[in-house]
Amino acid sequence: MMATEANYVIYTDGSAVNGKKNIAGGFSAIIVKDNKVKKIFKGSEAGANSMQSELLAVILGLYEFTEHFPHQNHLVIRTDSKIIADCFLQGWYKTWIEKKWMTTKNKTYWQLILNIMMVCNLQVKFEWVRGHNGNHFNEMADRVALKARKTKEAQMQLI
């Protein structure tokens, strides 16, 4: 699932306090084109842990990208989640599908990401960026996700 001629980059990040089921996890997606922010989205989900918040950020980014830029299908997702980046860069999801998702944690989230990409015919290249390392857009995504977690803004529920 590689992108060619990607004009859009989505920076995603999640923010959570693991082990605290009564605290919402926050997440954000920032859509960038030509090094300029085009759209910023954020959300929160009650009880979401760190990994779930990171996955929800990708889901939010993909969904909003297809809603706001329906005629575009090439994009890059930059995430500071090594697990998410490696899942797509190393093809882990293929093994999970072959094994019918039997041992996959957060399978509903992973399946939703794959379904959005497939149904919307998205060509996505995933890239890992080191978090808290001075990347302007990653730092922005981090701040937005933290604010969404603390204020429980734009709440959503994963069905």
Image (cartoon, grey):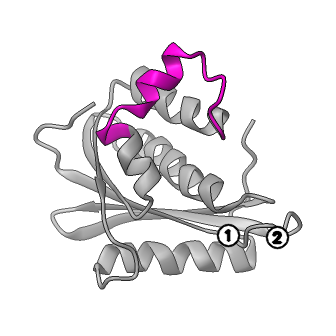
Name which quarter of the figure residue 67 lies in: top left
Instruction: Say left or right for 26 vs 99.
Output: right
The label number, if any, that marks residue 94 in the structure image: none
Residue 41 visible: no
- In the picture, the quarter occupied by the N terminus is top left
Give yes or no for residue 98 being in the magenta stretch.
yes
Residue 134 against residue 109 in the figure, above or below: below
Amino acid carrying mark 2 in the image: Ile
Q: Regarding mark 2 in the picture, which secondary structure is present there?
A: loop
Image location of residue 54, percent across then percent down: 55, 57
Residue 108 against residue 34 in the figure, above or below: above
Residue 80 against residue 110 in the figure, above or below: below
- The boundaries of the magenta stretch are 88-105
The label number, if any, that marks residue 16 in the structure image: 1
Gap in Å between the C-alphas at discs 2 and 1?
A: 8 Å
The label number, if any, that marks residue 23 in the structure image: 2
